[in-house]
Image (cartoon, helix red, strand yellow):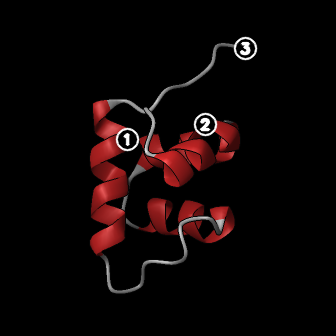
Amino acid sequence: MSEQKITDTVFEQIMELRKLPDCPNLFDTKAAFELAIKYNFYELADLVFCDTWIYSTFILTGER
């Protein structure tokens, strides 16, 4: 299994998610996943679902 990374597309989708009025606590991966699907952020949804560690590390540290 190849390790996913925070691509430019995923980064932009996270930044857009943060701006939404119904944005959850971004550490709530279930809510972040559901909102990503709702707004058609499929690359972000895939990362949250398949590689929660990479997603969570980015949310915590900002490291891409």
Mark 3 crowdedness (10 Å alpha carbons): few <14, some 14-19, many ≥20? few
Q: As rendered, which of 60 and 38 lies closer to the eye?
A: 60
Given the current orientation, which residue lies at the most extreme front position?
61
Q: Where residue 13 appears, x then y in whole percent?
A: 33, 51
Residue 1 numbered mark, or none = 3
Where 25 sits versus 33, above or below?
Answer: below
The residue where tag 2 is placed is: 54
Q: How far is the residue under mark 2 from the one under mark 1?
A: 12 Å
User: Mark 3 or mark 1, which is nearer the start of the sequence?
Assistant: 3
Residue 27 numbered mark, or none = none
At mark 3, the secondary structure is loop
User: Mark 1 or mark 2, which is nearer the start of the sequence?
Assistant: 1
Q: Which amino acid is tagged 1?
A: Val
Left or right of residue 13, residue 33 in this image? right
Q: Which amino acid is tagged 3?
A: Met
The residue where tag 1 is placed is: 10
